[in-house]
Image: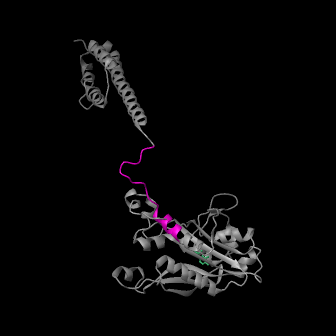
């Protein structure tokens, strides 16, 4: 048969091909586009074509190949659309999920809700503020001026804008936000996301969560803080939990302390996470520095208060024995499915 006639017949065949399902589409693909397709050998026929028709022949074979590709792509799209339409039509969104899995709260939410509810029971209310902050609320108002060495303790993400906003490095910024717009008494708990420019590893991440607490009123004392934190530790870690306060330094509190809970040394794991001491640090706290009150236009002669801040990831990792912080941000369903809770 003349090669030109052969091309015409194949063109006919392509345009008449009836493709009704994925199997027929695959047959078509193998025949016309697969590695041993029927068009390929035609390219070799060029040597048998008269010189003056070689160009015409080349164009015809290329057109044939393109026709096969166009047909394949068109039919593929059409079939896919068909499948999609059919599955949408068959879908009943009011049905319960097949395996009864209803999802579960994220461990961070579970721990955060638990901490918040412990403080709500003793009269704290939840305050939420912005994650994009300005330098003043995050640092300066919190007694951490520009040249303060404590700024190096927190590597900051700055926004590239004219007013130098930043992603808050701690929920302590909620303190200055609230104190500039409310006069005491203030008794709040502020859960939220914070950001630091840290290398991501098993132990640290560039985003994490904190809960901040703030109580300002007349005659608030260090003893009030201690008792409140002891109550918290016992609600959170069990009624017999002991705490200890170690002197520490934060720019926004004076005096400052870090609080440890007694974890014991009952097994090898306890040794490891407490570094052999039996104690675990869970939060920073202290009496609000009079400079902070003054910066926020609260009279330090009339009012005093305490503040505390704690990381949530660390507590979630302790409670659920999670050994890599990254698991908390990857949203792998196999990990998340393990958390069921009433909170
Ligand atoms: N903002 C501190 C941090 O991120 C934690 C903290 C310490 C908060 C002492 C406080 C506090 O309110 O009083 O490391």
Pinpoint residue 175: horizontal percent, then vertical percent. 67, 71
In this picture, residue 158 sits left or right of residue 89: right
Name the dominant secondary structure of the magenta segment.
loop
Q: Residue at x 36, y 22 (%)?
A: 67
Depth check: 249 or 246 in front? 246
Above or below, 99 relative to 217: above
Above or below, 175 relative to 250: above
Q: Is residue 153 visible?
A: no
| Magenta residue check for 189 | no
Q: Quadrant of residue 340?
A: bottom left
Instruction: Report the quarter where the N terminus lies.
Output: top left
The segment highlighted magenta reads: 94-114
In this picture, residue 317 sits left or right of residue 68: right
Pinpoint residue 303: horizontal percent, then vertical percent. 74, 81
In this picture, residue 21 sits left or right of residue 329: left
Above or below, 3 relative to 179: above
| Magenta residue check for 103 | yes
Depth check: 198 or 40 in front? 198
Q: How many marks?
A: 0
């Amino acid at each position: 048969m003349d090669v030109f006639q052969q091309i015409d017949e194949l063109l006919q065949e392509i345009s008449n091909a009836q493709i009704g399902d994925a199997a027929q589409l695959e047959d078509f693909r193998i025949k016309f586009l697969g590695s041993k397709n029927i068009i390929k050998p035609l390219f070799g026929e060029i040597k048998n074509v008269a010189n003056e028709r070689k160009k015409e022949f080349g164009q015809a074979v290329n057109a044939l190949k393109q026709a096969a590709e166009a047909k394949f792509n068109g039919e593929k799209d059409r079939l896919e659309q068909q499948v999609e339409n059919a599955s949408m039509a068959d879908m009943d969104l009011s049905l319960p999920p097949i395996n009864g899995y209803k999802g579960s709260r994220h461990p961070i939410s579970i721990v955060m809700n638990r901490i918040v509810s412990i403080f709500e029971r003793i009269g704290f209310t939840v305050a939420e503020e912005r994650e994009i902050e300005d330098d003043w609320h995050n640092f300066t108002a919190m007694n951490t001026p520009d040249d303060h060495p404590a700024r190096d303790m927190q590597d900051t993400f700055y926004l590239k804008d004219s007013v130098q906003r930043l992603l808050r490095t701690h929920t302590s910024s909620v303190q200055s936000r609230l104190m500039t717009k409310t006069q005491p008494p203030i008794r709040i708990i502020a859960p939220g996301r914070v950001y630091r420019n840290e290398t991501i590893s098993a132990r640290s991440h560039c985003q994490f969560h904190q809960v901040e607490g703030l109580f300002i009123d007349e005659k608030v004392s260090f003893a009030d803080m201690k008792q409140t934190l002891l109550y918290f530790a016992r609600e959170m870690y069990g009624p017999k939990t002991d705490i200890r306060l170690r002197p520490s330094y934060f720019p926004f509190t004076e005096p400052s302390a870090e609080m440890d809970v007694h974890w014991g040394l009952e097994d090898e794991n306890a040794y490891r996470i407490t570094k052999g001491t039996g104690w675990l640090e869970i939060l920073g706290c202290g009496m609000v520095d009079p400079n902070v009150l003054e910066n926020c236009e609260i009279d330090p002669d009339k009012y005093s208060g305490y503040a505390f801040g704690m990381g949530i990831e660390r507590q979630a990792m302790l409670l659920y024995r999670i050994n890599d912080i990254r698991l908390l941000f990857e949203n792998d369903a196999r990990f998340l499915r393990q958390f069921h809770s009433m909170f």
